[in-house]
Amino acid sequence: MKDTITAISTALGVGAISIIRVSGDESINIVNKIFKGKNLNQVASHTINYGHIIDGDKIIDEVLVSIMKAPKTFTTEDIVEINCHGGIATTKKILELLLINGCRLADPGEFTKRAFLNGRIDLLEAEAIGDLINAKSEKSRNLAINQLSGTTSNMIKNLRQKILEVLANIEVNIDYPEYEDIFVMTNDIILPKIKEVEREITKIIKKSENGKIIKEGIKTVIIGKPNVGKSSLLNTLLEEEKAIVTDIAGTTRDIVEGQILIDGILIDLIDTAGIRKTEDVVEKIGVKKSYDLINKANLIIYMLNNNEELDQQDNEILDKIKEKNYIIIINKTDLPNKLNINNIKVDKNNIIQMSINNKIGIENLKNKIKNMFNLDLIEQEDYNFLTNARSLALLKEAKKIIPNIYKGINDNIPIDIVEIDIKKIWEILGEIIGETYQDELINQLFSQFCLGK
């Protein structure tokens, strides 16, 4: 990390300003070469300096240059930010001059990666930056801000400290066995602490499932036969004409998506092609996609027509979704009834009768989603939990080890053998916050960031 990196940190396009960021030991020197104004090497840290970016004698743009000297910067290195006018040509020209004068183009997420590697932030805080950028609701923004503040990291650090105290007790016993009875130490000291750790891990996992919903939303797939009202439902929920609605079967041939918020939680709605047997090549692909999405959805809304009897295909799909979160909508209740609700072999509490054309049942559907996912129970003030699949998977992996510790203690296995599993939990928790990591993981994680962050 000895080289000096640069990248455009604002979206490239026409706008009021663009920001080009530079980080590294030579940041100030390099920018000073193309800056006409004060000598940037002599200005105070954390100041904004007016001047011009030049290419030889030619003025490129009128700019404001922010100077931030190490170590009190995001990367802990010298950082320079050039605020220029937001034209594409101007921004790219300044970037080109920086590259010519000694900078290297930063990789995606490299500024944040340097902040992590230099100890400015831990891995949870680094991931929170990406979450904050991608937040699509107020709750997901609050969640990211909380994690960025270090509160969640401190929760994991406190858990590691408790385990470290257990390990210290074991080490003392191993080094000085004459001063402490092994049996008493195991049952009176270690066992209660391990149980406490297990309780806290279980609590965090449970709360973090809510965190996943807040961050990622609920992927909701609307399926059913042609002309049961799938596209009409999507349009009604979105309050816009997103999907084409006609009386012609097979109008929707590909997925159509939209998003709404229910109690601050993102609901990602996916309208699918009507499921039926067809010889149309394009429609067949759409039907296949509908089936594929069933396996990937957090919630399935299966729509039936009140004016049609159940058939074999309906029963096959009902059987396919019964192990997942599902809601059955019986639409077109304004038409004569031909559907016997008693023939629908599902939990009747998951059935909602609707008439989308008459706007009947929409609020019932929203309330059902709220109750099914306990959206009203997700505490708005407590955002202290893990939010990404990587950290949550590691925490679950740590929890799986705990029964081995109990078994070892109950079977009177030598305490230095039991210690191996305890230490493994401590190491896994370290991976969550980045105390230990593999280079491949770090490279993959930060490659998902946008360029210039």
Image (cartoon, grey):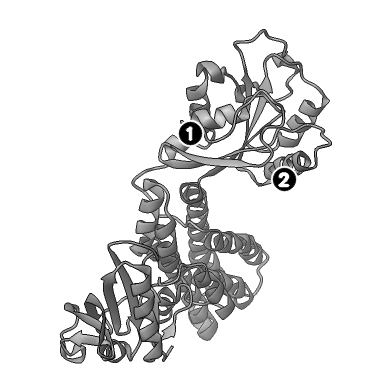
Q: Compare residues 10 and 70 and report the one nearer the observer.
A: 10
Q: Residue furthest front?
A: 58
Distance of mark 1 from mark 2, alpha carbons?
24 Å
Would you place residue 437 above or below residue 203 in this image? below
Is label 1 in contact with label 2 (beta carbons under 8 Å)? Answer: no
Toward which corner of the image does residue 298 lie, by quadrant? top right
- Residue 346 left/right relative to 68: right
Labels 1 and 2: the sequence-earlier one = 1
Q: Compare residues 125 and 218 and report the one nearer the observer.
A: 218
SS class, disc 2: helix
Would you place residue 218 above or below residue 448 in this image? above
The amino acid type, in three-letter code, at marker 2 is Asp
Q: Compare residues 280 and 356 and report the one nearer the observer.
A: 280
- The residue that mark 2 highlights is 292
Q: Residue furthest top?
A: 336
Q: Compare residues 96 and 48 and report the one nearer the observer.
A: 96
Category of crowding for the residue at label 2, using alpha-carbon neighbours closer than 10 angstroms: few (below 14), some (14–19), many (at least 20):
few
SS class, disc 1: helix
Residue 183 screen position, x and y as percent: 57, 69
Residue 238 screen position, x and y as percent: 48, 34
| Residue at x-position 31% and y-position 66% | 86
The amino acid type, in three-letter code, at marker 1 is Leu
- The residue that mark 1 highlights is 238
Q: Is residue 291 among the parts visible in the rendering?
A: yes
Residue 281 screen position, x and y as percent: 80, 42
Q: Is residue 371 among the parts visible in the rendering?
A: no
Residue 228 screen position, x and y as percent: 66, 24
- Residue 361 left/right relative to 223: left
Category of crowding for the residue at label 1, using alpha-carbon neighbours closer than 10 angstroms: few (below 14), some (14–19), many (at least 20):
some
Quadrant in which the N terminus appears: bottom left
